[in-house]
Image: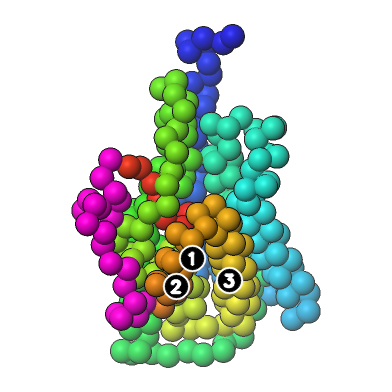
Amino acid sequence: MTSRDDRPTLAVTAYGWTAYLLALAAIATTVGFLANVGLPLSIDSGSGRSLGSALLVDVGLLGLFAVQHSLMARPWFKARWTRLVPRPIERSTYVLLASLALLVTMALWVPLPRTVWEVHGLAATLLWAGFVGGWLLVFAGVYAIDKDDLMGLRQVEAYVEGREPAPLDFQTPTLYRYLRHPIMTGFILAFWVTPHMTVGHLVFASGMTAYVLAGVWFEERDLVRAFGDRYRRYRSQVPMFVPRPWRVLPTPENEGTDGRPEGTDGRPPGGD
């Protein structure tokens, strides 16, 4: 039996943090890519091709990203995947590969710069505010839950400390009382809200939105299987993407200020 001192804790820690930092870099790159700022290659820059050729490449890239990102998040895949990948770095591997898939999609993207709409002045300022607001909602949604678990660091930390990660229960902190999927709502806003929409940007936004809708459908099916009536009740009370003031999940009396029952550790849906 391998002792604690013999375990490759340094390698596992380095691997986990590499995946985490690459994910942050991929997100930052996506912001610049969609805003057409700060990068040598953006969604509307570079040499174009014919419409058919560009669509073939771009839709193919979006499809490959969607398949990788959604397939690896499914419980049945994780059960098989962990026969090959050690469980402490399973989540980090998912984060690493998803980040690489997103970076490759942006690196190989073929621009279609024909304008669909373009606005200026106050309207443009408001749309830029909505774009920034979408990304802020993404980060707020991530920080409202267990971001270390979402990014694989909680599992790495547990391994380094020689213990099993505490099981996660279904919980609904802060934003998740108003929206079932605030992270995905933020992404949709970031994809679509722009003062200058081109054909290429429209293809990207449409493809990513289709992926989000399909991914959420699979995720909610998995959540119903995992939590049964608890999730069904939650789903009936809280809207999916668009908040409605008259549909807010009440705070149970036994929950702490972070939205979790006192003495528990858990995160809500939206973390695949």
Please check the rendered image and state whether residue 217 is part of the magenta-colored stretch, yes or no.
no
In terms of sequence position, does the residue under pointer 3 or pointer 2 come before the other? 3
Q: Which residue is mark 1?
A: 232
Q: For label 1, count other residues whose C-alpha is less than 10 Å away and answer few (under 14), some (14-19) or many (20+).
A: some
Q: Position of residue 100 (x, y in %)?
A: 60, 49
Image position of 96 with respect to 36: above or below: above
Image position of 200 with respect to 76: above or below: below
* Amino acid type of the residue that numbered disc 2 sits on in the rendered structure: Ser
In terms of sequence position, does the residue under pointer 1 or pointer 3 come before the other? 3
Q: For label 3, count other residues whose C-alpha is less than 10 Å away and answer few (under 14), some (14-19) or many (20+).
A: few
Q: Could you tell me which residue is drawn at 21 percent across and 53 percent down?
A: 257
* Amino acid type of the residue that numbered disc 1 sits on in the rendered structure: Arg
**How far apart are the two marked residues, 1 and 3, measured between alpha carbons?**
18 Å
Pointer 2 and pointer 1: residues touching (CB < 8 Å)? yes
Q: Position of residue 111 (x, y in %)?
A: 64, 73
Pointer 3 and pointer 2: residues touching (CB < 8 Å)? no
Q: Magenta region: which residues?
A: 243-263
Q: Quadrant of the N terminus?
A: top right
Q: Which residue is mark 2?
A: 236
Q: Which quadrant would residue 114 be assigned to in this image?
A: bottom right
Q: Could you tell me which residue is drawn at 69 percent across and 32 percent down?
A: 83
Q: For label 2, count other residues whose C-alpha is less than 10 Å away and answer few (under 14), some (14-19) or many (20+).
A: few
User: For the image shown, how many numbered marks are present on the structure?
Assistant: 3
Image position of 231 with respect to 47: above or below: above
Magenta segment's dominant SS is: loop
